[in-house]
Image (cartoon, rainbow, N blue to C red):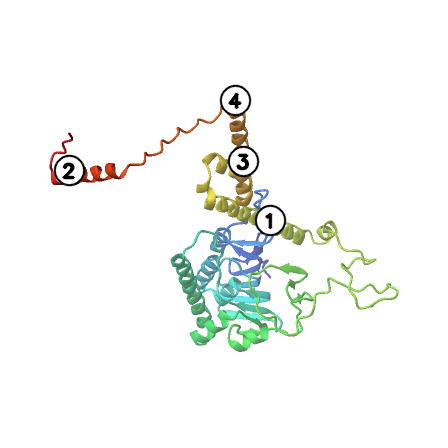
């Protein structure tokens, strides 16, 4: 029997193997991204499994002449545009005659479901998880109502594009699929098979290793926390992840009360303990916390500068510059500082005026006396008659001659 020629290409998020140049197989586990994320604090690449666009599409070219391709998929999704690019490239290979099969080992969520639907034949476990939902976007900019409506319209176009993919795979009505996307529909493998998203239900005894945290907020796949943006309502029947266990040796108290960790003695698990047991998840959690903290700091600084700009016109350029850069503070603190400075200057000005008055000895100078007013002389009756006659002649234009 001739020996098979096997070529293997290994990436962090997937493995690609080709046998005799004819049969290709790919294990595709990870988040779908355009490029590897960078830690904002350290400028170092974020650790984790990432299916990167250029890297993946370049590797896909190496198997384009294979007769068939089997993809073992486990992804909670990621970038919508990258997912569409991978979907369309796989559809192109299928249209060229390649027989493509996708086996959902655990999850095909969001962008992962688009990759799944690109294949001719989809196999799922009854307990696999499939998620379809409307796409979303970060809005990090200054927006007016027109720009926000434009963003919403663009998202609707992307949603329509994804609905076309689901319709082609399932044969279901477009409006039905859009309604499923809008309410974020999470399906078990069995439900996905019933709705036409999958073509075959594989052995029910196979355990894909899917668990959920006790608060139903975190999904675990084969012991690994899975990161995804939207999950919808979890189907019933998924077992709870046993990362918190009761201490069987505790005397008294509630025997059903869980410890803070699975370690003996019931002591809370420190971050270093968690890092030793789950180094990849610890680094991911740390990177996410750092990114969140950095973004919160950026937002707070922008809000501080914006607040100063809103009232800056009331004060001089020196006051505004000091509040922004030289001695950073909030807009409220800037106003308080300016008020204190004005009050201080007012007190100094008043003190200077009082000093000037004292030095001039102005207080010792007496006030000027008002001149005495001469009382009018009382006229006799004869004088009053003579004055009246003179006034009458003056009004008539006659000369007033006195003898």
How far apart in space, not on screen, are marks 4 and 2 (Cα)?
A: 57 Å
How far apart in space, not on screen, are marks 4 and 3 (Cα)?
A: 31 Å
Can you identify the residue that label 1 sits on?
293
Residue 160 image point, x, y percent: 42, 67
Q: Is residue 177 left or right of residue 189?
A: left
**Element carrying mark 1:** helix
Mark 2 closeness class: few <14, some 14–19, many ≥20 residues within 10 Å: few
Which labelled disc corresponds to residue 161? none
Q: Residue at x 43, y 76 (%)?
A: 173
How far apart in space, not on screen, are marks 2 and 1 (Cα)?
A: 100 Å
Which labelled disc corresponds to residue 361? 4
How far apart in space, not on screen, are marks 1 and 3 (Cα)?
A: 35 Å
Circle nearer the viewer, 1 or 4: 4
Residue 210, visible in the rendered structure: no
**Element carrying mark 2:** helix
Q: What is the quadrant of residue 185 in the picture? A: bottom right
Image height check: is 386 above or below 66? Answer: above
Can you identify the residue that label 3 sits on?
341
- Residue found at the far bottom of this picture: 194
């Amino acid at each position: 029997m001739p020996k098979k020629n096997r070529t293997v290409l290994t990436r962090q998020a997937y493995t690609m193997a080709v046998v005799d140049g004819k049969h290709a197989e790919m294990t595709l586990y990870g988040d779908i991204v355009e490029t590897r994320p960078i830690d904002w604090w350290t400028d170092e690449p974020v650790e984790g499994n990432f299916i990167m666009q250029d890297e993946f599409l370049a590797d896909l070219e190496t198997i384009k002449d294979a007769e068939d391709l089997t993809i073992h998929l486990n992804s909670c999704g990621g970038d919508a545009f990258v997912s569409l690019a991978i979907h369309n490239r796989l559809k192109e290979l299928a249209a060229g005659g390649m027989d493509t099969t996708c086996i959902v080992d655990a999850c095909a969520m969001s962008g992962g479901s688009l990759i799944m639907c690109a294949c001719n034949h989809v196999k799922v476990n009854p307990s696999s998880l499939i998620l379809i939902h409307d796409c979303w976007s970060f809005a990090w900019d200054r927006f007016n109502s027109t720009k926000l409506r434009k963003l919403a319209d663009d998202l609707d176009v992307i949603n329509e594009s994804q609905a076309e993919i689901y319709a082609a795979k399932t044969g279901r009505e477009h409006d039905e699929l859009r309604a499923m996307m809008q309410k974020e529909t999470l399906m078990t493998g069995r439900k996905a098979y019933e709705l036409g998203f999958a073509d075959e239900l594989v052995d029910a005894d196979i355990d894909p290793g899917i668990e959920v945290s006790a608060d139903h907020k975190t999904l675990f796949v084969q012991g690994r926390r899975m990161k995804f943006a939207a999950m919808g309502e979890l189907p019933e029947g998924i077992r709870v992840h046993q990362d918190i266990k009761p201490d069987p040796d505790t005397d008294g108290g509630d025997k059903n009360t869980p410890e803070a960790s699975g370690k003996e003695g019931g002591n809370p698990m420190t971050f270093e303990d968690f890092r030793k047991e789950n180094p990849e998840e610890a680094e991911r959690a740390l990177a996410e916390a750092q990114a969140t903290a950095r973004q919160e700091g950026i937002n707070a600084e922008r809000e501080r500068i914006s607040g100063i700009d809103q009232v800056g016109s009331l004060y001089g350029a020196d006051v505004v510059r000091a509040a922004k850069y030289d001695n950073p503070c909030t807009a409220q603190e800037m106003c308080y500082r300016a008020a204190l400075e004005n009050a201080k200057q007012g007190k100094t000005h008043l003190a200077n005026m009082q000093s000037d008055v004292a030095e001039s000895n102005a207080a010792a100078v007496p006030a000027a006396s008002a001149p005495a007013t001469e009382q009018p002389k009382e006229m006799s009756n004869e004088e009053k008659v003579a004055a009246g006659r003179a006034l009458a002649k003056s009004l008539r234009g006659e000369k007033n001659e006195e003898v």
